Amino acid sequence: MTKENKSHLTRLITVCLLILFLVIAFSALRGIDYLFFRGMASANKSSEVLPDTVRQRDELNRKRWPQGFRLHRYWWVGGAAVYIAEMDRSATNLQFDIELANTQIIGRETISDATRRLMRRDILPLAGVNGSFGIRGDSYGRGGMTFNLHIQDGELISIPIARDRWGYSPPSPWGETSFGVTPDGEFLLDSVQLNGKLHIDNRGRDTLPIDAINQICDSYAPVVLYTPRFGRRTLTRRAYEFTLKKLELPLTGKYSSRFVVTEVNRRGNSVIPSDGLVLAIESGTGRDWLRAINVSTTGTLEIALTPTKWQRVQRGIGGNLRLVRDGKVEPELLAFGASYGRTAYEHRNGASRHPRSALGFNDDKLFLIAIDGREPGYSMGMTLYDMGRFFSELGIKHAINFDGGSSSTLWALGKVVNSPSNGYERRIFNVAMIRAKER
């Protein structure tokens, strides 16, 4: 090989090596660049790091979110679709509210129908979830009624007596829990007691404890007050009833008013006057009060909800079980989950997977939640313990369980967004909702 040929070969090898070096250098720089920006992206998303139990989170109808509102679907690794509407507690354009089905205790209504009715009154709901528990109908003519607390616009519409309805002691902080909001925006989650009394003006100045408002009058709750919000009649049987008038309405969490008895009915099922109340006393107890209460009897009706903060609540709605307390699964729910429901035997279906509904909150947000279930291949639902654990992982500080099963529905931005297990929207007793604030 001549010197000239060797020179050409050397230059060619040098050029190839230089090109190879440039390619390697460029690839390395691209790798560093990718890692750098990927690291920045991870850092930017660090505030929304999802727990390992979330397989995926979808944004629903993102373009229609008003300020302070979000709507997500979480795919839980255990095999459930969880729909959550969120409201920033600091949002000046939004507020929490509740609505009673058909504006009264008796009867039921779908969330879609309730929201349409509200919109005709220029109220704009953004999201709503089915709330309280109740009976769907009975032989007494009650075509559905809630048996939980309901306070709307400051009016005390319904409150039951503490009762072993679920298989645990009623005074337990785990059960018969209600969510309430005070005028200054404080969120409360408590077991609420009525503390109602009827003071009768007579020589003995008798006092009659009131067990419940707009609930079933029976041996569990022998003394019940019925307001016009219940319906047209009390629908009682074999009860002694006394019509009270000349008092202030509506009832509130802190209430005192004079009254006069205008009618006595020994057969029950009295007409509820639009300007008064009906006091119903179960037959076994009522007979003894006929001597103390008659037409023209006067006295004072007093109500003082406890805890005392509830005397100021403007909007309150009841469920049954507290799921999360201070960011941790409720201690009694831990025992319930570990025993597969045996610690609260009457609510053992809570240890099985079903559709569920709930409400939760933390220092920054309010959450309305519906979990689809009973749909193999899509979503099988959750146990109560699954709910508590998953909510705490999402950063929910306090949570309450609402009526579930086929009633579990989340309506948002004009339509039902989840998949109710019956394949259609069921009529329910009341709605917990996020709505636009009135201007």
Image (tube, rainbow, N blue to C red):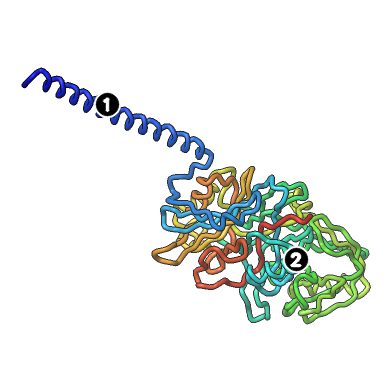
Name the image quarter holding the N terminus: top left
Judging depth in this view, the residue of 219 and 324 nearest the camera is 324
For label 2, the SS is strand
Q: In this view, does 290 lie above or below 312?
A: below
Residue 21 is marked as 1
Residue 392 to residue 300: above or below: above
Most extreme residue toward the top is 3
- 80 or 58: which is nearer to us? 58
- Alpha carbon of mark 1 to alpha carbon of mark 2: how far? 85 Å
**Circle 1 — which element?**
helix
Q: Which residue is drawn at 29% across and 31% down?
A: 23
Foreground disc of the pair 1, 2: 1
Left or right of 413 on screen, residue 30: left
Residue type of the residue flagged with mark 2: Ile
Residue 187 lies, in percent from the top left, at: 69, 48
The spot of residue 268 in percent (x, y) is: 77, 79
Q: Give the labeled residue for mark 2.
A: 213
* 188 w.r.t. 405: above or below: above
Q: Residue 134 location in percent, x, y?
A: 63, 68
The image position of residue 156, as x and y in percent, is: 77, 61
Q: Which residue is drawn at 42% across and 51% down?
A: 55
